[in-house]
Amino acid sequence: MFGNPEQMAQAMRQFADMLSAPQGSGPVNWDMAKNIARHAVVADGDPSVMEGERRQIVDALSLADLWLNEATALPSGVSAPEAWSRSEWIENTVPVWRQLCEPIAQRMVETMGGALGGANLPSEAQQMAGPLMGMLKQMGGMMVGQQIGQAL
């Protein structure tokens, strides 16, 4: 990793994103997750969807919808078919990922904080650990944000 300047630059960007995260922004650093996902997309290439490809995608979705209408009683989930580039997909789906991931991430961060600053500690140690717990929660949110960004 450290022999490759591009990977080192990416690691430094991710670290800067982690340090610039506002506190209290929730259990996941979503800005960092989006930045990591965008950097990964750009590194692999992110061609725009051309008009011909867009038509093919819309036609394929219509055909699949037609087949599924015959095979299932469930209503179609497609209201307006769209074709997105990788970057557009990230931007347009992050709100849904947020709804799915936030409750899980919240529980993970709470569990990490509870395990490390548990009630088993003497009261003096709990008082001293207070600021550390806030930092650990922020680090947990950054860790989850980094993992989500890599997954997207």
Image (cartoon, rainbow, N blue to C red):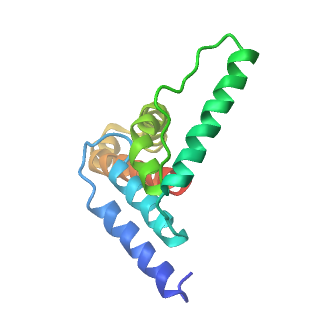
Q: Position of residue 31 (x, y in %)?
A: 33, 53
Query: Looking at the rendering, which quadrant does residue 15 occupy?
Result: bottom left
Is residue 4 shown above or below 124? Answer: below
Q: Which residue appears at 41% of the width and 53% of the height?
A: 33
Q: Classify residue 8 as left or right of residue 77.
A: left
Number of marks drawn: 0
Is residue 41 shown above or below 31? Answer: below
Q: Position of residue 22 (x, y in %)?
A: 23, 51
Q: Which residue appears at 61% of the width and 35% of the height?
A: 61
Q: Which residue appears at 57% of the width and 81% of the height?
A: 1
**Residue sitting nearer the eye, 117 or 46:** 46
Q: Position of residue 39 (x, y in %)?
A: 44, 66
Look at the image and tell me whether residue 115 can be seen.
Answer: yes
Q: Which residue appears at 50% of the width and 35% of the height?
A: 81
Look at the image and tell me whether residue 118 can be seen.
Answer: no
Residue farthest to the top, as pictured: 73
Query: Looking at the rendering, which quadrant does residue 13 occupy?
Result: bottom left
Residue farthest to the right, as pictured: 71
**Residue sitting nearer the eye, 13 or 84:** 84
Q: Classify residue 65 as left or right of residue 33.
A: right
